[in-house]
Image (tube, helix red, strand yellow):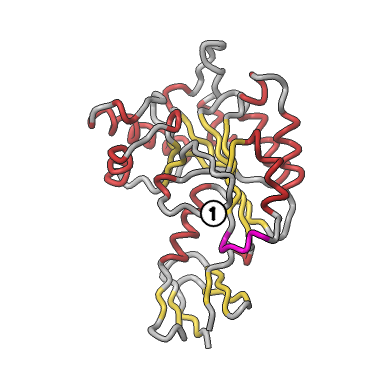
Amino acid sequence: MLISAKYFTGKKPKALTMSYDDGPFEDYRLVELFNKYGIKGTFHLNSRYLDRDDYPAQPEKIKMADAKKLYEGHEISVHTVNHCDLRAVNNNRFIHEVMDDKKALEDIAGYPVRGMSYPYGYYNDDVINHLRYLDMEYSRTTKSHKSFYMPDDFLTWHPTCHHNDALDLISYFDSSRWNMEMPLFYVWGHSYEFSRFGDKWHVIEEFCKRISGRDDIWYATNIQIKDYSDAVKNLKFSADDSMVYNPSCTDVWLDIDREPVMVPAGKITNLK
């Protein structure tokens, strides 16, 4: 019997997630675009700078009072209080930058904030170890790999590409050569780039239009991808693979001899 984790939730063979930093004013337009096309995004915010409007020194930020409603159906995530290089701060400042941002964003979101992205994309082994101690569950880098594999370590979660390259990779994502388990298309950027460096909104709208509405893609936030990956990894198989127990609260789909099989949350499933 051949068993593999070939599917995302809902028996979807592929997934797409979007990741945007800093909470600039242009997030209003980007979220509206995502909602129009059914795309899910994760938005990494610096709590100190919400409401900031000293453009052009900094791109104007969204209003804190709007954040909960604006990002509803998406994910709010940590980006540190002050957008600082976490490699260069002492332990006390590190805790402040991560945990105070987390607390402020949880007060806005109304749910536990569990992930983040690295300011400037900067990190090292010490930063990663500190985040493990603080129970952060994932952190996105800026090291695009132009591929579609799931991360080995979610605290060094490398994206597929910046949004400038996303359109060119759709055909690559659909190529039959990607005979891999759970291919993930992960796009990152800053929404102010669509306005500040010339009018580029047509780029992201064309991407959303071409990638949306497909039955073979799960449109998910970063934390939803992480939770599903954890559910797959935590499946408990019998010695002969005839049974599997799913201790999570998430239904998991497996490929059993090239047939999709659902392993319901909290249940034991016979595979033979």
Whether residue 72 is visible: no
Q: Is residue 32 magenta?
A: no
Q: Which amino acid does label 1 sit on?
A: Tyr
Residue 180 or residue 80, whichever sits in front? 180
Query: Quick check: 177 left or right of 150?
Result: right
Q: Does the magenta stretch include residue 181?
A: yes
Q: Name the residue under label 1.
A: 149
Q: Magenta region: which residues?
A: 177-182
The answer to which image quadrant residue 168 occupies is top right
Query: Quick check: 20 left or right of 216?
Result: left
Query: Could you say whether the residue bearing mark 1 is in a helix, strand or loop?
Result: loop
Residue sitting at x 44%, y 72%: 246
Residue sitting at x 40%, y 67%: 234
Residue 256 or residue 171, whichever sits in front? 171
Residue sitting at x 50%, y 59%: 228
Query: Quick check: 26 left or right of 229?
Result: right
Image position, residue 151 (x, y; %): 47, 52
Q: How many labels does the image show?
A: 1
Image position, residue 263 (x, y; %): 52, 74
Looking at the image, residue 3 lies above or below residue 78 = below
> Callout 1: 10 Å neighbours few (<14), some, many (20+)?
some
Whether residue 228 is visible: yes
Q: Point out the residue furthest to the front here.
A: 177
Report the predominant secondary structure element of the magenta stretch. loop
The answer to which image quadrant residue 216 occupies is bottom right
Residue sitting at x 58%, y 76%: 261
Q: Point out the residue furthest to the bottom here.
A: 272
Query: Quick check: 172 left or right of 81?
Result: right
